Image (cartoon, rainbow, N blue to C red):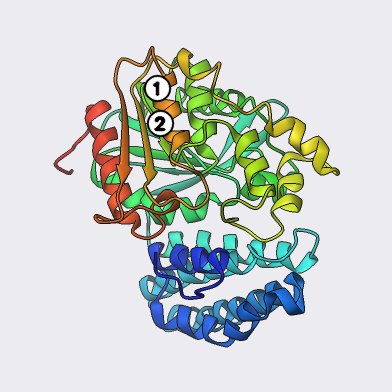
C-alpha cells in the first residue's frame, strides 16, 4: 500500500480511502503536506494534538473546494459544482474520522459532509433516492441506487463496517453495481454513520435484525425483485453480512468484503498490540459504536460476535474476499469463515495477493481489483448483466 505517512498506517489508510473514492491527488497532497511533522511527532506530542492537526487541515481543504463548487453553481454549471461537492463531502468525512467522537466539531463536520454529498448527487443527477428503512420504532437512513432498465431489478443490501458511512461506500462501489444492472440499498445501520451520530443507534451481535428490516423494505418496492436480494458488507461487515445471511433466509447471496470470523479475538489481539488500527483511539471508538461506557462491557459484546456456531446456517452462495497482506485482520479469519459455512451450496474464498494488488485491508491498496471481482460474482449469482447494461 502506498503510505503517504510511512510511520502512520491509520493516516495512510485514510489517504488511500480518499484516492480510491474520488479525491484529487493534488488536493489530498495539499491537505496532508503540512501534517508530516504531526505524524512523526505523534508519540511525543500526544495523539489528540496530531488528530486535531489532521482535522483542521482536511476541513480547510473541504471548505476551499466548497467555495469553488459554489462559484460553479452560481455560474450555472451544476455538473461541475456537483463533482466538487462530492469531494467536499468526502473530505469532511475523512476530517471527522480522526478526532474523538466527544469533540463537538466532529459532528459539525459530519453534517457538512453529508449535506455536501447529498447536494452533489442531486446536481450530478445520480440515480439515487435518500430513503428511511422502517426499523422497529425508528428508521435507518439509506441511499437507494436504482439500476438502469425496466422491471424488477436485483438488489444488494450494503452494510458498513466499524467506521465508514453510506456516502463513502457509494463512492467505492455503486457505479460498478449499476453498470451490471444491480441496484443498491446502502444503509447506515446501527453503529455507523447517521444511525450512530444523529440517532444514537448502537451496534451489537444480532445484525440480522436491521438486515431483515432492509429486506422487508425492499419487498415493498416494485422496482426490486424480492427473489434476487443479497447482502454485502466490508471490514467489520465481514461478521455483519454472514451473520445476517445465516438468520435471514431471504438473502440470495452474501459477500464478506474482508473477513471477521471472531471479532472478540480480533479486538483482544489489537489491544495486545498486534495489527494496525483503522482509527485513532480504537478502544474509545469501540465503546461509542457499541454504546458502552466501559471497555470491559464492550469486550463482553464483541466476544459474542463469532461465526463459529453461525456460519453453518448459511445456505445461500457466499463469497469471502481478503487481502494477503491485511494488517488489521489475519487471513485465518477468511479461511475459517469459508470452512465453517458447510451448508452454503456455493462458497468461495478469494485471496488478493501482493503481486496482483488488493492485498491490504479490504483492498485499500487497489480497491478496483476487489470491487471488480465482487460485482462480477454478484452479477452472476443474481442473474444480472455481467457484460454490462
Query: Residue drawn 46% across and 14% down?
Result: 312
Give the crowd class for mark 2: few <14, some 14-19, many >=20 residues within 10 Å. many
Q: Is residue 376 above or below residue 73?
A: above
Give the crowd class for mark 1: few <14, some 14-19, many >=20 residues within 10 Å. some
Compare residues 182 and 148 and report the one nearer the observer.
Answer: 182
Secondary structure category for the residue under label 1: helix
Residue 249 visible, this angle: yes
Image location (x, y in percent) of residue 113:
59, 65
Image location (x, y in percent) of residue 348:
30, 28
Mark count: 2
Image location (x, y in percent) of residue 274:
60, 50
Residue 76 visible, this angle: no
Compare residues 329 and 252 and report the one nearer the observer.
Answer: 329
Q: Is residue 232 above or below residue 113?
A: above
Query: Residue drawn 44% across and 17% down?
Result: 314
Query: Residue drawn 75% across and 58% down?
Result: 101
**Where the N terminus falls, by quadrant?**
bottom left
Instruction: Kindly check if marks 2 and 1 are in contact, taking CB atoms under 8 A apart as contact.
Output: yes
Query: Residue drawn 36% across and 52% down?
Result: 359
Q: Which residue is mark 2?
A: 335
> Could you give the CA–CA distance between mark 2 and mark 1, rounded to whole angstroms?
6 Å
Q: Is residue 339 left or right of residue 92?
A: left
Compare residues 376 and 2 and report the one nearer the observer.
Answer: 2
Q: Is residue 209 above or below residue 58?
A: above
Secondary structure category for the residue under label 2: helix
Q: Which residue is mark 1?
A: 339
In the rendering, which numbered label is found on residue 361? none
Amino acid at each position: 500500500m502506498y503510505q503517504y505517512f510511512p510511520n502512520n498506517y491509520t493516516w495512510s489508510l485514510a489517504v488511500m480511502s480518499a484516492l480510491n473514492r474520488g479525491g484529487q491527488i493534488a488536493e489530498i497532497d495539499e491537505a496532508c503536506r503540512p501534517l508530516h511533522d504531526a505524524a512523526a511527532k505523534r508519540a511525543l506530542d500526544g495523539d489528540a494534538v496530531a488528530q486535531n492537526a489532521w482535522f483542521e487541515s482536511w476541513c480547510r481543504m473541504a471548505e476551499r473546494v466548497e467555495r469553488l463548487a459554489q462559484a460553479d453553481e452560481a455560474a450555472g454549471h451544476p455538473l461541475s459544482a456537483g463533482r466538487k461537492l462530492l469531494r467536499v463531502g468526502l473530505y469532511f468525512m475523512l476530517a471527522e474520522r480522526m478526532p474523538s467522537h466527544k469533540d463537538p466539531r466532529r459532528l459539525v463536520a459530519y453534517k457538512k459532509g453529508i449535506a455536501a454529498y447529498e447536494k452533489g448527487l442531486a446536481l450530478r443527477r445520480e440515480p439515487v433516492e435518500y430513503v428511511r428503512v422502517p426499523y422497529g420504532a425508528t428508521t435507518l437512513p439509506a441511499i437507494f441506487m436504482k439500476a438502469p432498465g425496466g422491471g424488477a431489478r436485483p438488489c444488494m443490501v450494503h452494510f458498513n463496517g466499524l467506521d465508514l458511512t453510506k456516502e463513502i461506500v457509494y463512492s467505492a462501489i455503486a457505479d460498478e453495481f449499476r453498470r451490471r444492472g444491480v441496484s443498491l440499498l446502502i444503509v447506515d445501520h446501527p453503529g455507523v454513520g447517521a444511525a450512530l451520530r444523529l440517532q444514537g443507534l448502537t451496534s451489537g451481535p444480532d445484525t440480522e435484525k436491521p438486515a431483515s428490516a432492509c429486506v422487508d423494505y425492499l419487498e415493498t418496492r416494485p422496482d426490486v425483485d424480492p427473489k434476487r436480494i443479497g447482502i454485502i458488507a466490508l471490514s467489520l461487515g465481514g461478521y455483519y453480512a454472514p451473520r445476517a445471511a445465516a438468520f435471514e433466509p431471504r438473502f440470495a447471496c452474501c459477500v464478506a468484503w474482508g473477513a471477521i470470523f471472531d471479532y472478540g479475538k480480533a479486538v483482544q489481539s489489537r489491544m495486545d498490540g498486534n495489527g494496525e488500527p483503522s482509527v485513532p483511539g480504537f478502544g474509545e471508538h469501540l465503546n461509542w459504536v457499541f454504546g458502552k461506557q466501559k471497555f470491559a462491557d464492550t469486550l463482553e459484546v464483541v466476544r459474542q460476535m463469532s461465526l463459529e456456531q453461525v456460519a453453518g446456517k448459511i445456505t445461500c452462495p457466499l463469497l469471502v474476499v481478503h487481502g494477503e497482506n491485511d494488517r488489521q485482520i489475519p487471513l485465518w479469519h477468511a479461511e475459517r469463515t469459508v470452512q465453517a459455512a458447510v451448508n452454503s451450496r456455493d462458497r468461495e474464498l478469494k485471496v488478493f495477493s501482493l503481486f496482483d494488488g488488493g492485498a491490504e485491508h479490504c483492498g485499500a491498496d487497489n480497491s478496483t481489483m476487489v470491487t471488480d471481482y465482487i460485482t462480477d460474482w454478484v452479477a452472476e449469482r443474481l442473474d444480472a448483466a455481467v457484460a454490462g447494461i
